[in-house]
Image: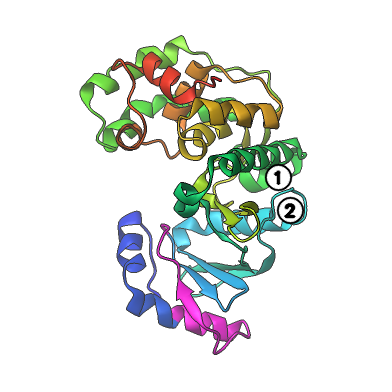
Amino acid sequence: MLPSVDTNDELEEVVGDEALLRPAAQDLCGQLGLAGARIVRFPEGSLPVYAVGDALVLKLYPGFEAAEAVREARMLSVLWGKLPIPTPRLHAADQYKNGWRYVLMSRLPGEDLNEVWPRIPRADQERIIVEAAEGLAALHALDAAPVVPITGPPDWGRFMAGQRAGAVEQQLSGGLAAPWLEQIPDFLRAVPLPTHRRPVLLHTEFMREHLTVDPHDGWRLTGLFDFEPAMVGDPAYDFVSVALFLTRADPRLLKLFYEAYGHPPFDHRELMAYTLLHVYSDLNWYLRSLPPPPRQDLDSLAETWFGAGG
């Protein structure tokens, strides 16, 4: 039986203990009428996720992430059949034991885009970027007002103010070096974020790791998943993950994305600010993973990562 989990440290211990998790997943499958189904653990992710047979996916959430479990289930219901990119279909969601919750959803066909990206010809990479942009544009075009109670935040400006207040501490906890940390307060003060844009439904982690493609059908996009961190807010916020983890600081790909999305490029300093204010921001990790700037300052970094050239 799964133990009660109340902190991220406790969760990490449980997530790494397959001898504890697998019997729970099998027990839950039995309760869902799937006794005897083959279950295979997905190796990636911060939460336990299992393929159940060939058609289903079972995702487990600890008690302290109950809100995320409810949000993901509700978002799957809202989005099913609404986007040009397929999303998982919700089959069941409820409480399990000791505060744990689960979501049972359909499995998207294809392979992880991030894993197969190096094998994809450049022309197909560019077409995938176009398809992805059209999918994000469709997500942003949906009426977001009904889902605010599901996703939050109820007040985007207040939410951003809270992120500003904790921005330095968040980067410090990620191990960011002092020369970068010292620039953050002045940079954020110098970049006022717009307040006039229509709030949209945000994926918040629109990246290769959350997209699937079919290598046997011309590398077509076959799915978009992971809606537990969805929010409603400024559409520019979603372009942080687009630029960092989908186009990966490739200005040509980012330009294609903007063209297919149907919006002029957002100001690169604004996107740098949103990078620092993002819920999952870890600038130290980004600096290790992405092309380095010519100068060690945030303006140069903004130009390097968020420029949308030809």
Residue 95 counted in the magenta span: no
Q: Is residue 239 left or right of residue 276?
A: right
Q: Residue at x 37, y 73 (%)?
A: 3
Colour option used: rainbow
Which mark is in front, 1 or 2?
2
Q: Which residues are magenta?
A: 24-46
Q: Are marks 1 and 2 in contact (CB under 8 Å)?
A: yes
Residue at horizontal 59 percent and vertical 45 percent from the top: 230
Quadrant (top left/top right/bottom left/bottom right) for the N terminus: bottom left
Q: Quadrant of residue 10?
A: bottom left
Label 1: how many Cα within 10 Å (few below 14, some 14–19, many 20+): some
User: Which is more N-terminal, label 2 or label 1?
Assistant: 2
**Left or right relative to 2: residue 154:** right
Residue 88: name its quadrant: bottom right
- Residue marked by disc 1: 147
Whole-percent x and y of residue 168? 33, 26
Which residue corresponds to the image point at 48% horizontal and 48% vertical from the top-left? 117
Q: Seen from this angle, which residue lies furthest left?
A: 178
Q: Is residue 124 above or below residue 264?
A: below
- Looking at the image, the residue that sits furthest to the top is 190
Is residue 234 visible in this depiction of the protein?
no
Residue highlighted by disc 2: 78
Q: Secondary structure at mark 2?
A: helix
Q: Quarter-wise, where is residue 134 in the image?
A: top right
**Residue type, mark 1 in image:** Val
Q: How far is mark 1 from mark 2, CA to CA?
A: 8 Å
- Callout 2 amino acid: Val
Magenta stretch containing residue 37, yes or no? yes
Query: 50 or 152: nearer the eye?
Result: 50
Residue 150 percent across, percent down from the top left: 65, 48
Question: For this view, does 159 lie left or right of residue 262?
Answer: left
